[in-house]
Image: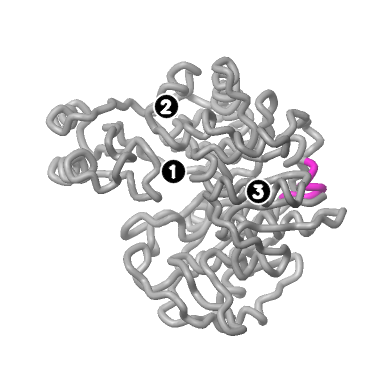
Amino acid sequence: MKILVVGSGGREHAIAWRLSRDPVKHELFCAPGNAGTALVAQNADIAADDIAGICEWTRRNNPDLVVVGPEAPLVKGLADALASIGTPVFGPVAAGARIEGSKRFAKEIMRAAGVPTGLAEIHTDPAEAKKALARFGLPVVVKADGLAAGKGVVVAESVEEAERAIDDMLVESKFGKAGAEILIEEFLDGEECSILAMTDGENALLLPPSQDHKRVFDGDKGPNTGGMGAYAPAPVVGAADMDWIKSNIIMPVVKELGKRGIPYRGILYAGLMVTPEGGRIAKSGKRINVVEFNARFGDPETEAVLPLIGGDFSKALLHAATGRLSDGDLEILPGAAATVILASGGYPGAYAKGKKIEGLDKTAGGDKSVVFHCGTAAKDGTIVTSGGRVLSATGRGATLREAVDRAYRAVSGISFENMFFRKDIAHRAFERN
């Protein structure tokens, strides 16, 4: 097939890489892609959120499928625009992408579908929002309703911190329209888990559960990031939990969206909190709440999950995009995978770009390890840094320990100025033993 992958990060490199390993050979393109996607696909110099540009490219090149990576173009209506010209697209229409683009909408869908989630109130007036804090206690979560580049969520440990977050969003407008409406939300304690469900609007197939590492430093310390690593499968949920999650979270949301005339086709990403208190009880006795929904593959979860998917990945994506998904479309391989993010010094704050990356030619690991490009660019024949999260080193093994060790071996061969990474990926899984 001729396939266009939209996006420029590690997630998109992982998608293109996995498609390149299908039993049949595809003609792969990425828009705009990065220095890594150029190794497995042809890059097209079109921004991911350039709806008109991507549609024009599609008219000229007539791909069999478009796979949309990031959330912003989905919220802007890229899937709608592509569908209008007859192109199959893996990714929800704008009305479905609102489940990530509006936290208020997500809560409304969850309540209507009977999905377990934390209590929340919607506010536009800062004084009223501050009064609401007393009803929630501490810690408390303050969220911008819309997309805020991963920075619109504050877990406040004090009233002063919560009030400052409210002022930042509603008074100072630090997140623009995204923060014009906010949620004051119940803090849910426990262990997080990411569930990526592939759906065609009627059926759903769950990929292996994964766990992201949001905090920048070892031991889950420091500010939140876009993710410093991930691993799969995450033992925080088992097979019985996965069945419960599908029946009580994923399918009720898919059906509720369908009742509203929204055929959701793509990835429905459920960010879960597994906790001993609050929510509903899964068959295993655990209590599981939804923290958030996303409308696309997670990043860096995708880099840890896709190495565990076998068979013809393009068939699963196409069948989801065209309403023909079936149980046989997804093959899950045994074993485990883990990915470690290599970041630029200063991230998630200010960081320098254009630093030469050494050692990429020494990291090839066949089926056992691969390095995905997250924020890279080609310059004068060399690969340089162009983002805060630069590379994602992934290892696969029969056990999680093997996978993690292989990921860190890949890391050991790479260097660039002020590079840093977490050294405790999958620590929660190992602590269980």
Q: Nearer the viewer, mark 3 or mark 1?
A: 3
The range drawn in magenta is: 309-315
Image coordinates for residue 45, horizontal then vertical, percent: 60, 62
Horizontal side of residue 185 vs 201, given as left or right: left
Image coordinates for residue 312, horizontal then vertical, percent: 81, 47
Image position of 348 with respect to 282: above or below: below
**First along the sequence among labels 3 and 1:** 3
Horizontal side of residue 395 vs 126, given as left or right: right
User: Dot 1: within a 10 Å radius of its alpha carbon, few (fewer than 14), some, or many (20 or more) residues?
Assistant: some
Q: For mark 3, what is the residue? A: 56
Give the spatial CA distance, label 3 vs label 2. 31 Å
Q: For mark 1, what is the residue? A: 191
Instruction: Give the residue at x 69% y 30%.
Output: 200
Image coordinates for residue 77, horizontal then vertical, percent: 54, 37
Q: Which mark is residue 228?
A: none
Q: Secondary structure at mark 2?
A: helix
Q: Nearer the viewer, mark 2 or mark 1?
A: 2
Amino acid type at mark 3: Glu
Amino acid type at mark 2: Phe
Q: For mark 2, what is the residue? A: 105
Give the spatial CA distance, label 3 vs label 1. 44 Å
Horizontal side of residue 308 vs 237, given as left or right: right
